Amino acid sequence: MLSLSNFLILAVGCSLAGFVDAVAGGGGLISLPAYLLTGIPIHFLLGTNKLTAAPGAVVSALTFFKHGKVTTKFMKLFIPLTALGAFLGVKTVVLMDQTILRPFIMVMILVVGVYTLFSKTIGSTNEFDESKVRVKHYVIGSLFSFCMGFYDGFFGPGTGSFLIMFFILYYKMDFITSSGNAKAINLTSNLTALAMFAIEGKVAYSVGLPIIIFVMIATWFGAKLALKKGIKVIKPIFVTMSLLASLKLLFDMFK
């Protein structure tokens, strides 16, 4: 049972994470530290984080899809491989000892935060041409989707940011279209990982379920804002979130 203070930490942290994730990706950099503050065992922390993130991921992905910002030609191949990667990622992480997993997760959060901080070059124009898509584009995208699925199942934070940067740098998409495709893949890995954590009995429903409504509302507003304002709002939030998360985690590790 959550104390009032821990409930407020999760309600605020996960809502902010949902909003940020819908706008620029990387919401896990906020929600995971919030869960760490509550003292929930690590494996339950990872599983419950998927529970609170899943509804928001659905809202965000559907919003982008409805506005035509998801490349369905890619998703038919990328989604199954993402699911496979997430399945294997969860199977791997539940085998790890919690005593070594906690510091490992803290280091991973820091690494992802620093990475997103320096990934500031994001697309403002869409140069993607679907008629020029070749076999190699499917192969590279499939491999990357599988790896991101595994990473999201194993750990998670920063997955959306990695995917957005991939679609921008490799497929030359703009930020909005990249975000839409990232949301579709991120939704797949999130739901697959949640199902696996649930099967393994690593989801604290009494903790996560009360938080979900806050996350869904925040995510809906975030997705609407991203679609309406585009690069003008996405870029500063993306960079600011990365900077603040990195500085906080660095302070926590060395204080």
Image (spheres, rainbow, N blue to C red):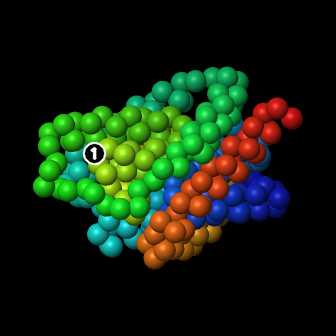
Task: Indicate the position of residue 123 as horizontal and vertical percent values.
Answer: 41, 56
**Crowd rating for badge 1 (residues with CA inside 10 Å; few <14, some 14–19, many 20+):** many
Q: Residue at x 37, y 46 (%)?
A: 169
Residue type, numbered disc 1: Phe
* Location of residue 67 by image quarter: bottom left
Nearer-the-camera pick, 82 or 253: 253
Residue visible at 32% across and 65% down in the picture: 69
Residue beneath disc 1:
78
Q: Quadrant of residue 8?
A: bottom right
Q: Judge whether 159 appears above or below 96 on screen.
A: below
Up-down relation of residue 105 to residue 167 (above or below):
above
243 with respect to 228 (left or right): right
Residue drawn at the location 42% of the way across and 35% of the way down: 150
Which image quarter holds the N terminus?
bottom right
Q: Is any atom of residue 103 visible in this view?
A: yes
Q: Quadrant of residue 187?
A: bottom left
Q: Residue furthest right?
A: 255
Question: What residue is shown at x 63% (from left), y 23% (from top)?
Answer: 97
- Frontmost residue, 198 versus 20: 20
User: Taking 110 as reference, is 32 above or below it?
Assistant: below
For numbered disc 1, what is the local secondary structure? Answer: helix
Picture quarter with the C terminus: top right
Q: Position of residue 221 (x, y in %)?
A: 54, 74
- Across and down, in percent, residue 21 comes to 53, 58
